Image (cartoon, rainbow, N blue to C red):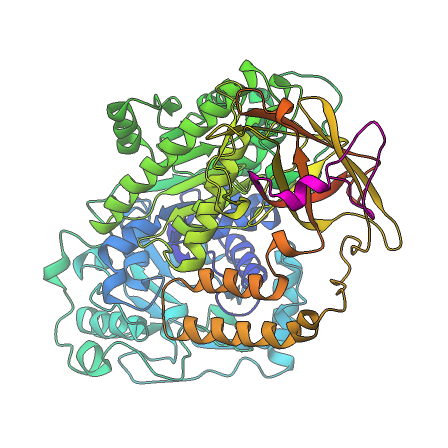
Amino acid sequence: MISIIVYGRNDAHGYNLHRRATLSLNCLAEVLTDPDDEIVFVDYNTPDELPTLVEAFSDTLTERCLGLLRVLRVRAAVHAQRFAAHSHLPAIEPVARNVAARRANPSNRWLLSTNTDMILLPRSDKSLSEICSDLADGFYGLPRFELPEWLWEHLPRNGPKRAMEEVERLGSRLRLDEPTLSHEWMRFDAPGDFQLILREDYMAIDGFDEAMLLGWHVDANLSRRMFIHRGSIESLEEHVAAYHCNHNRTPTVYHRAEWIANDMDRFFHSVDQAEVPEQRETWGLADTSLEEVPVRQRIGPHFANSVVGATAEGPVSRGVSDSRKAKFGLEYDSRHVLPFIADSLSVAPPDARIGYIGANPVLEQMLAALVASLGLGGPLARAEFEDLRSVGELDRISDVLVVDLGIDASLLGAPLDTATGPEFARYRAELGRAFNTFQRLVGLERTHLEQGEHPRRFVLVNSSAAFWNAYVLAHLHCSPTTTHSRVRNAIVKLLPEDDDAARVTLVRAQRLFRWIVRRDTGPRRFHVHLGKTVELADLDDYGGFEDGWAHPDKTAVWTKGLRSQLSLTLDEPCETSCLLTLGFEKIGICSDDSLRVELLANGALVAARDFSEARKPGDPQRGSGSARDAFRPTIRRLAAKLVRQMRALGIPGVDAAVGLGRRMVTGSAQDSKHAWSIALPANVLVDGRVDLTLVVQEPVRWSDDRRHGLRLRSFTVGKRGWRQRLNTFHPASQTKVGKDSG
């Protein structure tokens, strides 16, 4: 008998959208009693990563409503490609209503165009279906009665009968049922909340006019054209009362200070024919296949059962994640992560192809099983990392790309960022290749965007690790994530971030990855030029750093644990003993305490020192009382002002200036109180090679269990002068000058 036409978008339009839409849909369902009746809801341009509006509150819909409801989804890509350039509105009303009308049950005589904030109250025991069954042919309207927010927001949304009874009781008692009349071509003000039209008439006039892309007066245009077509607008107010849930507490996109609207003269006053022949063959996206969302299936156990069924069996014990260590974490429990990836699949089109790039066979197998169970557009697609043709094919067929930048913890047994051995090296290399393929796909996606295509969703797994995060933030718009879920949604930026800060951060991330793979090709040594200071801030290659080091940061690296090893090779022979100078940026000790450190060269003790007078972790820097220290605050302020001015002027190399400012404030590590010069006897420099070991006695245990002792900033190997030879250290006697030995 009746197809009710409504539309919306999951965007919180107006005040308390979910509540009033649920209340309205449940109440509309109560007045439909014919077997062919239906409510056709068009979800228009909801972002792809979100469920439709109806799905968002489907748990509050009555069984009666769910049985009558059909949800058609117009994806964001359709709006972007056809209408976005011509309208400021995220939802195009005439298109959405025409989509519903074109796909409504053809056996129904009537179409009712209304909104999801209306409550219809028959004035007799008859339902709306029964009332319409006896109606003569015509075009019918109703006056709209407003319900104040305080009233409708307290009605039981999932108790429509009680809600309708309360509206009926208060409507007349509070004088809310006051009709508002308008021009004879509309009959009532705001006619769009109840426009009952014969299906055959709707087809005859070519539906709503889809040239009306700017909002407002869409209903007035239909009324004017139907007035021409039928000669009059009839009223159903003796049979039905129409109440509108007012939502003017907050402004919407239609209520801007600058008024943007369809031309009232063109689309109302000057209209002289009912038909719109220019859209006769196309209205309602006639040439577009749209998905019908199976709401009942989505809210039932099917999806959850699919996720559970795809989750591989494993140990009963659950892993524990630590946010303090997550920055460098490359492993996770795939069974834990899969449900968060499934969130993106739950809103994917039924014919979507899912692509996968990663090096985690456990997650890949689970994801393939889930895709198959959900019956999506085909089996899980993947590409071979080194095969450009395979990567291109994955790009071509995938609607959603899952990018996995981690490994299942069950395959490892140790942290992947620090563990050594061929198996760990293989997984790190695989992750590197996966990341390279990800970058290639980002480039391909950017090409699509430049050609005007709609952005595709990337589902990123473990992408917030320090090795990848800088690239991700520079090249993609991302949703946030947590250490717990490890999953975030993203789309590629048309233009990547390319300022100084972004470039520095990217370089830092690349250095971190080179750090963790520094020993994967076998033992390596660091080549040192005699007399040249090696600053860690300038290093691209960390070969020679063995066990006992934390991850480096911008300028230095902490020793980790009791022993930290560094293997060096001199670029020229040193016939006599050499002088090794180690520059430390910080010492990890508590106030009024000291740290005992020994230095071994090829296993032999060559020096020892008690470090003290250093700040404890997290405390402000304590000066030595020198003249330079007195000027440090002034220098720091001048450096900060210089940086701000350079950035404001767009001068390149700002970060170099920041580094310069830091050096002005802190001084060179070589001339600071944390410089340590040690004589290396000629007999330890075998073939110009030396293996150094820093032995830190009882490094302080920080709040997160890190055991960091010395923060190495630089080192130098040079030929000794006669002054240094006078201070040669003798391990047997443990002689030292002051607190230094060497």
Q: Is residue 38 left or right of residue 615?
A: left
Image spot of residue 502 (x, y percent)? 43, 55
Q: Is residue 482 left or right of residue 534?
A: right
Residue 700 appears anywhere in the view = no
Q: Residue at x 48, y 41 (%)?
A: 539
Image quarter of the C terminus: top right
Q: Residue at x 59, y 74 (%)?
A: 635
Q: Which quadrant of the view contains residue 654? A: bottom left
Image spot of residue 46 (x, y percent)? 41, 53
Q: Residue at x 71, y 35 (%)?
A: 560
Q: Nearer the viewer, residue 584 or 250?
A: 584
Q: Is residue 626 in the magenta section? A: no
Q: Which quadrant of the view contains residue 217? A: bottom left
Residue at the farthest left position: 278
- Above or below — where is 655 with respect to 720? below
- Main SS, magenta region, reads loop
Image spot of residue 30 (x, y percent)? 54, 54
Q: Residue at x 66, y 68 (%)?
A: 166
Image spot of residue 126 (x, y percent)? 51, 58
Q: Nearer the viewer, residue 604 or 198?
A: 604
Q: Nearer the viewer, residue 125 or 545?
A: 545
Q: Nearer the viewer, residue 544 or 717?
A: 717
The magenta region covers 716-742
Q: Is residue 73 left or right of residue 368?
A: left
- Above or below — where is 80 with respect to 734? below
